[in-house]
Image (cartoon, helix red, strand yellow):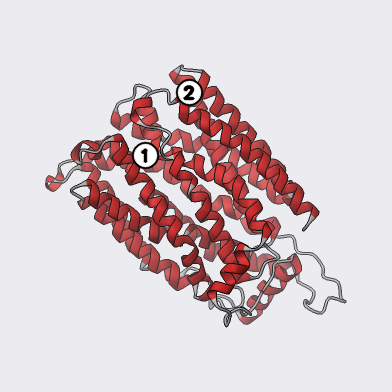
Amino acid sequence: MSIAEDAKPQALHSDNPRCIAIDADAEKRLVRKIDLHLMPSIFILHLLSYMDRSNIGLAKIAGMEDDLHLTSHQYYTAVIVLVIGYTIAVVPSNMILSQTRPSVFIPIITFAWGSIAALIGAVRNQGQLIALRFLLGVFEAGFGPAVIFLISAWYRKNEQSKRCITFLTAGILSGAFGGVISGAITSSLDGAHDIRGWRWLFIIEGVTTAGVSLIIHWTLLDYPHNSHALSPEERKLGQQRLIEDGTADQGESKTQSISIFVLLLKALSNWRIWVLIPGYMTIFGASAISYFYPTLVNGMGYASATAQYMTAPLYIASLAAVIPICWVADRKPHARGRLLVGDLILGMVFFALTVGIRDCTARYVFLCFINMTILTGSALGLSFAATALAPVTRDVRAIMLAWMSGVAALAQLYGSALFPEEDSPVYIVGFSVFAATFAIGAVSYGLADILFKRYP
């Protein structure tokens, strides 16, 4: 069944002066066309984005740590400096995006981060690694929030969860097959042209990203009111169906002449964003564990190359839960808050079990469930936010989504510090902290769900 078939247009009341009646078949065709343009583009880009920022964990156990003489603290610094760059750049990036065309802005930043990722393969010391990781965070900052913003700008509320998970599935598959691909690259090319395998890993994946950026302009969509890929009738229908759905500002932005600082003030003074941030921080912080999956699996007794391959099931198993839960979330969008609460409670339980049980097989299974709850929570959290911010105008919504992502990214500063080498192989502190933060996240989203239903 096509992803577009979930569009469920409704007849409009004839006394609504803002809209005309929407033809159900025409809307299905439009949603299918939007999907064919937008979803493959952002899927491929997210696949590459995830690989470019997370391959440092795979490179670490493939020899980078020894070649650059990195201590545990230095590796932590290289991981979290990307988060710092991301946090600094994420709001300005989305402010630029809201004033420009996504089909131009996204390819530019993609070429930049792909080039930087490839250059990491040439680093000779910790300072160069940290500098390039910082720049990688700066240029990748504009992508993730931009995608969520575009999903909120193109789709009805009951269509967004599946699109969010389609986007995030790229990260899941990247995590799954990234380990396989990395294992193949680092083992088969190690020593080729006197270049270590982990260096080839960065070079090949970075050059691939930069190459894709050169063609992605022709497939990305802009906004419903100005996308060249749609006919005038399709652009009009695209705007009308979202106005009917309660999404604000479908047309030329009314804030083009307003100072960006005024837009920023409007975004930060809106109570909705501050309700969303605490819960999303707990999910984003826990996602830092992905940098340590190869290390965690390696600590269970698997050899370096085998550990890279053994990270794949952690992500593949996640699809078994993520897809059906997000399908339910789109069928019942008002249940997203409750689904989020349940997901975080389940994650809390598995983090706690990992603390108390030391059997390697059991801990590996728990890691599968932990990754499942993190990725499911990410998809639900993003669609929950996009729906909650639908009444906000386009430019302000872009800033709010970026601010939520930027502040939440700060949680990775502590998340990345929870697995130092001296705590191996059990990492009691790391798993205990994540169990506690998931409990906080469950409470936060429960309160947010109540507030948004009371004050829609």
Residue drawn where x is 35% and y is 40% of the image:
76
The residue singled out by tag 2 in the image is 363
The answer to whether residue 296 is above or below residue 395 is above
Q: Is residue 89 left or right of residue 335?
A: left
Q: Is residue 34 left or right of residue 42?
A: right
Q: Quadrant of residue 293?
A: top left
The answer to whether residue 177 is above or below residue 427 is below
Query: Is residue 442 among the parts visible in the rendering?
Result: yes
Q: Is residue 22 left or right of residue 80?
A: right
- The quadrant of the rendering that contains the C terminus is bottom right
For label 1, the crowd category at 10 Å Cα-Cα, with few meaning under 14, some 14 to 19 and many 20 or more, is many
Residue drawn where x is 43% and y is 26% of the image:
427
Nearest-to-viewer mark from 2 and 1:
2
Label 1 amino acid? Gly
Query: Is residue 1 among the parts visible in the rendering?
Result: no
> Picture coordinates of residue 88 (x, y %)?
43, 59
Sequence-first tag of 2 and 1? 1
Residue 179 numbered tag: 1
Residue drawn where x is 54% and y is 74% of the image:
260
> Picture coordinates of residue 201 (x, y %)?
27, 47
Q: Quadrant of residue 404?
A: bottom right
Q: Secondary structure at mark 2?
A: helix
Residue 348 numbered tag: none
For label 2, the crowd category at 10 Å Cα-Cα, with few meaning under 14, some 14 to 19 and many 20 or more, is many
Cα–Cα gap, marks 2 and 1: 19 Å
